[in-house]
Each structure stands twice: as C-alpha cells, then as structure tokens.
Image (cartoon, grey):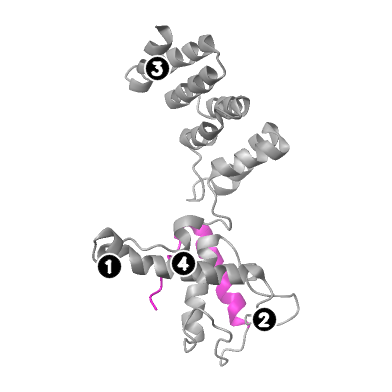
C-alpha cells in the first residue's frame, strides 16, 4: 500500500511530531502493532509511527485525538473506543482509493499526479472547514459579534499557517453565500473586512453587490466609487457602476 499522507512543514507540525513520537514510545518497543485494519498487518512499529506522525501534523492534534491515552496508564493504541479512530480509518481508505483512481481519471502518469493526503483538506486543523463556513455558522447561531470575535481568535491562533485564509478574500468568501438570504450579515462581514483591509477594492465591490441585493442603490454606488478610487482599473467595479447609473 502506498503512503498517501503528507507531512506539514510549519513549526507547530515539528513540535507535534516530537509529541507524537514521545507518546508512542511509551508502548513496549518490542511489541508489534495490534488491531491494524487499514495499514498492513505486518508493518513494524516504526512504519506505523511514521504514518501516525503525519496524521498529527496534518490535523494539528496529538495521539490522544484518536487513541485512548489516560494519565498514569500506558497508552492503549489498539483500542477502538474512540469514534475518531474509525473516522480516520474511513478517510485513509477514501484517500487511498482516490489516489489510485486519479491518474486514469486525469490521463496522467502516477508520478505526475498530485496525491491527496490528510494535509490536503485539514491544513493543520482537526475539522477541515473553510473559514467562511465556520464564521457563517457562528453568526447564525450566536450572532455576528460572536463571529467577529471568532475571526480574531482564529487569526491569533493560525495566522501564518496554512489553515485559513485571513486575507480580504477570506471575508469576501464568507459574505458571498449570504448575500441573498442573510444580506444584513453579509454586509456586516464585508464591513468587518474593511476594518481589517480598508484599501481592499474587491471588498468594496462585494459590499456594493450586497447593498444592491438590499435595494440600497445609493449605498452601492458609493461603494463602487470608493473601489474605483482605490483601484481605477477595477473592471468589475466599472461595469457594475455603469449598470447602476443607467
């Protein structure tokens, strides 16, 4: 079986590798891995540990995310008590099958095909969701102020890593699906974007679209004019402004 899991390269990943190695080393070194259901049953502990270390880096977690590790007791790596372990097994099978199908589906040689691994979607976080989906859910359940606070919290924790898009595009992507059904929230997210990125012409363009969805043409025109002050060559702003002024 080919290994399809890619090791992360940022500093947190390096620290997690040390933690993972230390935790797994607590088990008897001479004992072979038990209860392997996806990885080959004849793999050595070293081979299994290498894959597990890739998991910890890809998801930004420790061994106890999937394994039973109780304080003061030896780790029980063979236990199936945690649902996360079954989920990991399922995703391993999906990734393996997908990587086997990609070369033929894309008409490429296997060596030229980009392989899919845990890091492809997880990007260093346990739950592989885009920031827009996370913020929109929080806003719907707890209100926009909670979502704005969550944005700052996530940025403080993950900025500079590969986890989330903290550019102006990330908040535009958050607002865009909300423009028709939750227009006020979309406008709030775009105004948050302008607080963070006051010179973002694309944010002003998106704000104009949300304002127009709310039938506030005057405000939409003002936003497009601001976008063109920042970026006079913005073709989308020029086109939309021309349509609104007709």
Q: Is residue 50 above or below residue 216?
A: below
| Residue picked out by circle 2 | 76
Of the numbered discs in the image, which one, if any, rests on residue 240? 3
Name the residue located 57 percent from the left edge and 18 percent from the top edge: 214
Q: Is residue 237 left or right of residue 106?
A: right
Q: CA distance from mark 3 to mark 1?
A: 45 Å
Foreground mark, 1 or 2, reads 1
| Residue picked out by circle 4 | 94
Q: Closest to the observer: 142 or 14?
A: 142
In the image, residue 167 lies at what x, y percent?
A: 48, 37
Answer with the quarter of the image where residue 131 lies.
top right
Would you say the residues marked 4 and 3 are in contact, meaning their CB atoms lie under 8 Å apart? no
Q: At numbered mark 2, what does the secondary structure look like: helix, strand or loop?
A: loop
Magenta span:
1-26
Q: Quadrant of the C terminus?
A: top left
| Residue picked out by circle 1 | 110
Q: Is residue 68 left or right of residue 189?
A: right
Q: At numbered mark 1, what does the secondary structure look like: helix, strand or loop?
A: helix
Q: Is residue 225 above or below residue 200?
A: above
Q: At numbered mark 4, what does the secondary structure look like: helix, strand or loop?
A: helix
Question: Quick one: label 1 or label 4, which is nearer the N terminus?
Answer: 4
Question: Quick one: label 3 or label 1, which is nearer the N terminus?
Answer: 1
């Amino acid at each position: 079986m080919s290994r399809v899991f890619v090791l992360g390269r940022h500093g947190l990943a390096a620290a997690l590798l040390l933690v993972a190695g230390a935790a797994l080393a607590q088990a008897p070194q001479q004992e072979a891995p038990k209860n392997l259901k996806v990885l080959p049953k004849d793999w050595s502990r070293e081979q299994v540990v290498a894959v597990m270390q890739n998991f910890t880096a890809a998801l930004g977690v420790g061994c106890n995310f999937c394994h039973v590790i109780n304080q003061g007791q030896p780790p029980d790596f063979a236990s199936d008590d945690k649902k996360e372990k079954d989920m990991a097994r399922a995703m391993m099978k999906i990734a393996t099958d997908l990587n086997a199908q990609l070369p033929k589906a894309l008409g490429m040689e296997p060596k030229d095909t980009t392989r899919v691994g845990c890091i492809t979607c997880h990007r260093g976080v346990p739950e592989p969701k885009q920031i827009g989906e996370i913020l929109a859910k929080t806003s719907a359940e707890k209100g926009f102020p909670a979502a704005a606070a969550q944005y700052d919290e996530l940025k403080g924790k993950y900025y500079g890593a590969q986890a989330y898009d903290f550019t102006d595009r990330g908040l535009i992507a958050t607002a865009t699906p909300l423009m028709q059904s939750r227009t006020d929230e979309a406008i709030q997210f775009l105004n948050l974007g302008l607080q963070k990125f006051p010179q973002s012409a694309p944010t002003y363009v998106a704000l104009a679209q949300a304002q127009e969805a709310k039938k506030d043409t005057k405000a939409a025109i003002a936003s497009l004019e601001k976008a063109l002050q920042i970026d006079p060559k913005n073709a989308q702003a020029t086109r939309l402004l021309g349509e609104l002024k007709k």
